[in-house]
Image (tube, rainbow, N blue to C red):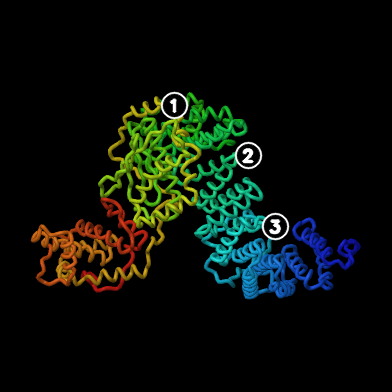
C-alpha cells in the first residue's frame, strides 16, 4: 500500500456505530467516485470501505442498500458487475419481500443495471435470473396494491409497476437474446440517462417489456394524481417521455400524457410542461413521425398561450408551421405563421417583435408552397419590411433561415415565370426592386445553371416537392391542391379578396382536420375531390354533384366581417360542418364508426387546432383589393397537353397500406372460396366462353393486369344475371322493386344448357371491367362497410379494396374454369 493510499479518507475511517449516518456519507463518496471521471481513481478505496462496512452492517437497515451501491459502483464505475454478482443475488433475496417503497425502487433500478450488464457481457448473472426477479418484483407490487394502501403509497406502487413494465427490449427477439460481445468496452454512460443520451427509440426495432401492463398502471396512477398532490411525479413522467415513441400507438397514450403533463405543470409550471412536449416532439421528428410530433407541439402551445410563457407558445406555433409544411399542408402552416404575427404584435412586447418578421416570412413561404407565387411575392414586401424593422443583422442569410428561404422562393418563382409565364416577369421584378431583393436574387440565379423546363416538367417538380400548381393565383379563379388520407384535394374559388380569404379558411381547416383524422384511419376513398367554394351570407348545406370519376362538391361559406368572433362556437360549427359532411360521404365506414373517430379527434383538442387564436380571414387579410383585382384580370392560357394537376401526399398522410377496418384474412379467403362456388350459375356460359379464342385472349390479358380467376368468374356472373334480369323486366315492366329483388335472387340457380345467355361478343374487356367494378358495392357490404356517395367512384373503390383488403392478392385452389392452365 502506498503512502497516498494509506492516507485516503476511506482508509482512515473507523466505524462509529451509527450505520445509517455512516452509510449516507459513504453513499455520497461512492457515487461521486463512480460518476465523475476525475474522482474515479479513489473508487477502489471507497469500495474497500463499503465491503468492510458490509461485514458489520445490520441486515435489515443498511445491508441491502450497501449491496445496491457496491453493485452500481462496480458496473458504472469499473465497467464490470461480475465481482458483485453474489451481492446482487443477496440483494434480491432480501429485498423482494420488502414492503419499503425505496428498496423496491432500488430493486427496479438494479434490474435495469443487471440487464445492461448482461447484454454487455459484464456479469455472470443469467437471463433466467432477471426474469425470476422481475416476476417476483411485479408480484410483490401486486400484493402490496391489494392491501389498499393510502393514495400516495398506491401512486408510488403503480409508478413502480409501470417502471418495471417499461423495460426496453428488441422487437422480435426472445427474452434471453444477448448480442455478441464487442471487442472494446466504451466509457460508462452518465448516471441519469435522458432522451438525448438514449436517442430516439424506434418502434420498428424496440418495444417495452409489457405495454398493456405499463399503460394500465399509468392509467391507474393518472386517476390518482389529482388526490396524490405530494406524489413526486417527475421520475415517472421523465420515464414516460423517454419511451414515448414506443407508447404512442396505445389508445391510452393521449390520456396518460395529458395527466402526467398536468401534474408536472402543477408542481413545476407551464414552461416545464412545454419543455416536455417539445422534447417528445423532437423525438418523434427524429424518427420521421411528424403527425405524433404535431400532437406534442399543439400540447405545448395550449399550455403556454397566456402570460409570461407566450414566447413558448409562439415557438410552438412556429414548430407547428414547420410540421404542417413538411406534411404538404401549406394553408394549415400559413395559419400558424400568421397567428405568430398576430400574437406577437398584440402583445406590444418589443422583445417579441422579431416573431412578427419570422411569421410573415414563413407565411410568404407557405403561399409559395401552395403555388400562389404572385401572392407570395406581394406578401414578401410586408415580410421584408418587418425583417428590416425588427431583426438584428436582417439581411444575413446564414443567420436567418426564413429570410434565406424567401430569397430562394423569389428566385425560383422568377425562373419559372421566365420559362413558362414570361408575361408575369414584370410583376415579380417590380416587387423584387421595391423590397431590395433584386441584387440577392440576381446573384443567386447567376450562380445556378438551371435547365430549361416545359410546363409539364415544372408541374412534375412541384408535385415532387409537395407544392401546389404553379401560378395557381393567376386568373379569375384560384385553386388550392393538396393530398391527404388517400384522396387528392382541389378547392377553387373566385380570385377576389373575400372569396379567397373564405376559401383559404376552409382549406386551412380541412388540412388541420385531415392531419388529425388520418391517424385514426377514416377509410377515405382514393379519389380526386374537387370543391367549388362560393360565398353566401346564409350558406346552405354543401351539395354533392353527380360524377362517377371525380368527387365534386359545392360548398357555401359566409364572408368574414369584423364582428366575427373565432371563439364563438357558431364560428367553429360553420367551419367544421361542411368539412364533416364531405369527409363522412367520402369515408367507407358506417356513419357511427366515422363519427366516433371525429369525437376522438375533438377530445384530443381539435377545437384549438382548427382556430389559431383569431379567425383565419382576420389573420390573413393583409393584401388590398387592388392585389386581387390585378391577379383576377390576368388571363391564364396553359398549354392544352398539360396533365391534370394532382398533388402528392407526404408518406405519413398517404393512403395506408395496412389491413383496413374489418379485414380478416380467414374470412376474406372464405369469401373468395364462396365466389368460386357460384360457378354452377354460369357453368355452361363459362364452358362456351372457354372455347372462344377471343375470350381466352381477353382472360389472359386481364390476368396480366392482376385479375384472379374469381374476378373473371364474378364479372361473367354479373353480366349473365343482369342479362336474364333484363329479359324478366321486359316480360313484366310493371314489377315492383320487391318483385325485382325476388326475381334476381331466383336467377342465382344452376344454369341449364338452354337458359338464355348473352352472346360471346358481349364479354368485352370493358364490359367485364364494368361488371367487376359494380360488384365492389356488394364486396363493401360483406366487409361491413358502406358507400355514402350518390354516384359511386368504382375505380376508387377497387383501388382501396386492393390496397387495404387484399382484393387483388387473395386466391384459393380451384377448378380450371377457363381452360388456360
Task: Name above or below for residue 813 compared with residue 372.
Answer: below
* Label 2 to label 3: alpha-carbon separation: 33 Å
**Viewer-side residue, 218 vs 11:** 218
> Are dots 2 and 1 in contact, CB under 8 Å?
no
Labels 2 and 3: the sequence-earlier one: 3
* Label 1 to label 3: alpha-carbon separation: 57 Å
Q: How many marks?
A: 3
Q: Give x and y (percent) for residue 591.
A: 35, 55
Residue 244 in which image quadrant: bottom right
Q: Which residue is mark 3?
A: 190
Task: Name above or below for residue 514 compared with residue 441.
Answer: below
Labels 1 and 3: the sequence-earlier one: 3
Q: In this rendering, does residue 343 appear at all?
A: yes
Q: Which residue is mark 2?
A: 308
Residue at image position (32%, 56%) is: 799
**Viewer-side residue, 437 vs 324:** 324
* Label 2 to label 1: alpha-carbon separation: 42 Å
Residue 642 in which image quadrant: top left
Label disc, if present, on residue 261 of the rendered structure: none
Q: Is residue 52 left or right of residue 138?
A: right
Q: Residues within 10 Å of mark 2 (few under 14, many from 20)?
A: few
Q: Which residue is mark 1?
A: 429
Give the position of the C terminus as an image quadrant.
bottom left
State the residue lying farthest toward the left.
731
Labels 2 and 1: the sequence-earlier one: 2
Amino acid at each position: 500500500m502506498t503512502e497516498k493510499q494509506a492516507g485516503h479518507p476511506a482508509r482512515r475511517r473507523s466505524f462509529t456505530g451509527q450505520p445509517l449516518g455512516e452509510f449516507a456519507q459513504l453513499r455520497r463518496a461512492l457515487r461521486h467516485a463512480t460518476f465523475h471521471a476525475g474522482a474515479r481513481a479513489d473508487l477502489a478505496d471507497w469500495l474497500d470501505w463499503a465491503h468492510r462496512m458490509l461485514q458489520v452492517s445490520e441486515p435489515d437497515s443498511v445491508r441491502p442498500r450497501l449491496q445496491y451501491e457496491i453493485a452500481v459502483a462496480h458496473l458504472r464505475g469499473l465497467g464490470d458487475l461480475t465481482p458483485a454478482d453474489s451481492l446482487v443475488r443477496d440483494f434480491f433475496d432480501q429485498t423482494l419481500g420488502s414492503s419499503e417503497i425505496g428498496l423496491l425502487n432500488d430493486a427496479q433500478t438494479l434490474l435495469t443495471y443487471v440487464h445492461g450488464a448482461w447484454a454487455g457481457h459484464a456479469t455472470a448473472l443469467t437471463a433466467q435470473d432477471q426474469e425470476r426477479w422481475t416476476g417476483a418484483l411485479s408480484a410483490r407490487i401486486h400484493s402490496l396494491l391489494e392491501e389498499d394502501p393510502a393514495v400516495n403509497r398506491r401512486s408510488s406502487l403503480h409508478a413502480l409497476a409501470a417502471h418495471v413494465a417499461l423495460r426496453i427490449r428488441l422487437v422480435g427477439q426472445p427474452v434471453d437474446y444477448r448480442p455478441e460481445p464487442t471487442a472494446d468496452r466504451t466509457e460508462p454512460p452518465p448516471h441519469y440517462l435522458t432522451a438525448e443520451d438514449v436517442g430516439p427509440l424506434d418502434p420498428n426495432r424496440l418495444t417495452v417489456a409489457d405495454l398493456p401492463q405499463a399503460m394500465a398502471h399509468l392509467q391507474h396512477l393518472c386517476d390518482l394524481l389529482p388526490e396524490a398532490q405530494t406524489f413526486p411525479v417527475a421520475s415517472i413522467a421523465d420515464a414516460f417521455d423517454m419511451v414515448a415513441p414506443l407508447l404512442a400507438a396505445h389508445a391510452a397514450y393521449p390520456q396518460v400524457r395529458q395527466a402526467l403533463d398536468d401534474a408536472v405543470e402543477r408542481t413545476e409550471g407551464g414552461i416545464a410542461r412545454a419543455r416536455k412536449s417539445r422534447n417528445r416532439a423532437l423525438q418523434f421528428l427524429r424518427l420521421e413521425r411528424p403527425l405524433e410530433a404535431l400532437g406534442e407541439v399543439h400540447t405545448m402551445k395550449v399550455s403556454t398561450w397566456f402570460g409570461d410563457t407566450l414566447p413558448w407558445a409562439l415557438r410552438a406555433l412556429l414548430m407547428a408551421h414547420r410540421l404542417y409544411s413538411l406534411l404538404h399542408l401549406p394553408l394549415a402552416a400559413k395559419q400558424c405563421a400568421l397567428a405568430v404575427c398576430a400574437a406577437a404584435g398584440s402583445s406590444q412586447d418589443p422583445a417579441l417583435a422579431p416573431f412578427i418578421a419570422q411569421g410573415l416570412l414563413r407565411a410568404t413561404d407557405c403561399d409559395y408552397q401552395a403555388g400562389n407565387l404572385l401572392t407570395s411575392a406581394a406578401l414578401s414586401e410586408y415580410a421584408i419590411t418587418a425583417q428590416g424593422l425588427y431583426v438584428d443583422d436582417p439581411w444575413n442569410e446564414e443567420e436567418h433561415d426564413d429570410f434565406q428561404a424567401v430569397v430562394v422562393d423569389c428566385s425560383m418563382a422568377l425562373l419559372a415565370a421566365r420559362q413558362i409565364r414570361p408575361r408575369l416577369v414584370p410583376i415579380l421584378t417590380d416587387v423584387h426592386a421595391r423590397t431590395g431583393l433584386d441584387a440577392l436574387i440576381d446573384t443567386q440565379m447567376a450562380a445556378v445553371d438551371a435547365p430549361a423546363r416545359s410546363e409539364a416538367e415544372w408541374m412534375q417538380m412541384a408535385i415532387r416537392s409537395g407544392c401546389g400548381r404553379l401560378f395557381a393565383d393567376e386568373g379569375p379563379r384560384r385553386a388550392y391542391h393538396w393530398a391527404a388520407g388517400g384522396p387528392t384535394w382541389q378547392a377553387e374559388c373566385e380570385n377576389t379578396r373575400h372569396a379567397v380569404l373564405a376559401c383559404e379558411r376552409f382549406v386551412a381547416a380541412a388540412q388541420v382536420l385531415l392531419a388529425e383524422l388520418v391517424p385514426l384511419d377514416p377509410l377515405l376513398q382514393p379519389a380526386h375531390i374537387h370543391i367549388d367554394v362560393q360565398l353566401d351570407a346564409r350558406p346552405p348545406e354543401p351539395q354533392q354533384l353527380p360524377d362517377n370519376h371525380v368527387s365534386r362538391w359545392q360548398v357555401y361559406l359566409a364572408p368574414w366581417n369584423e364582428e366575427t368572433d373565432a371563439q364563438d362556437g357558431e364560428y367553429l360549427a360553420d367551419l367544421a360542418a361542411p368539412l364533416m359532411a364531405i369527409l363522412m360521404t367520402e369515408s367507407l365506414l358506417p356513419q357511427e364508426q366515422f363519427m366516433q373517430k371525429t369525437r376522438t379527434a375533438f377530445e384530443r383538442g381539435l377545437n384549438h387546432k382548427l382556430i389559431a387564436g383569431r379567425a383565419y380571414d382576420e389573420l390573413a387579410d393583409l393584401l388590398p383589393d387592388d392585389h386581387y383585382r390585378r391577379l383576377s384580370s390576368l388571363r391564364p392560357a396553359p398549354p392544352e397537353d398539360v396533365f391534370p394537376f394532382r398533388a402528392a401526399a407526404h408518406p405519413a398522410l398517404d393512403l395506408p397500406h395496412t389491413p383496413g377496418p374489418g379485414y380478416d384474412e380467414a374470412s376474406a379467403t372464405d369469401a373468395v372460396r364462396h365466389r368460386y362456388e357460384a360457378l354452377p350459375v354460369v357453368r355452361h356460359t363459362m364452358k362456351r366462353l372457354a372455347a372462344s379464342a377471343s375470350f381466352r385472349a381477353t382472360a389472359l390479358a386481364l390476368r396480366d393486369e392482376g385479375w384472379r380467376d374469381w374476378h373473371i368468374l364474378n364479372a361473367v356472373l354479373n353480366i349473365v344475371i343482369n342479362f336474364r334480369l333484363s329479359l324478366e323486366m321486359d316480360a313484366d315492366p310493371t314489377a315492383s322493386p320487391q318483385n325485382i329483388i325476388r326475381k334476381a335472387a331466383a336467377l342465382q340457380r344452376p344454369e341449364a344448357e338452354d337458359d338464355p345467355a348473352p352472346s360471346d361478343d358481349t364479354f368485352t374487356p370493358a364490359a367485364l371491367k364494368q361488371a367487376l367494378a359494380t360488384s365492389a358495392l356488394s364486396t363493401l357490404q360483406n366487409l361491413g362497410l358502406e358507400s355514402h356517395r350518390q354516384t359511386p367512384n368504382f375505380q376508387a373503390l377497387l383501388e382501396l379494396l386492393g390496397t387495404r383488403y387484399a382484393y387483388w392478392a387473395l386466391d384459393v385452389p380451384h377448378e380450371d374454369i377457363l381452360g388456360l392452365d
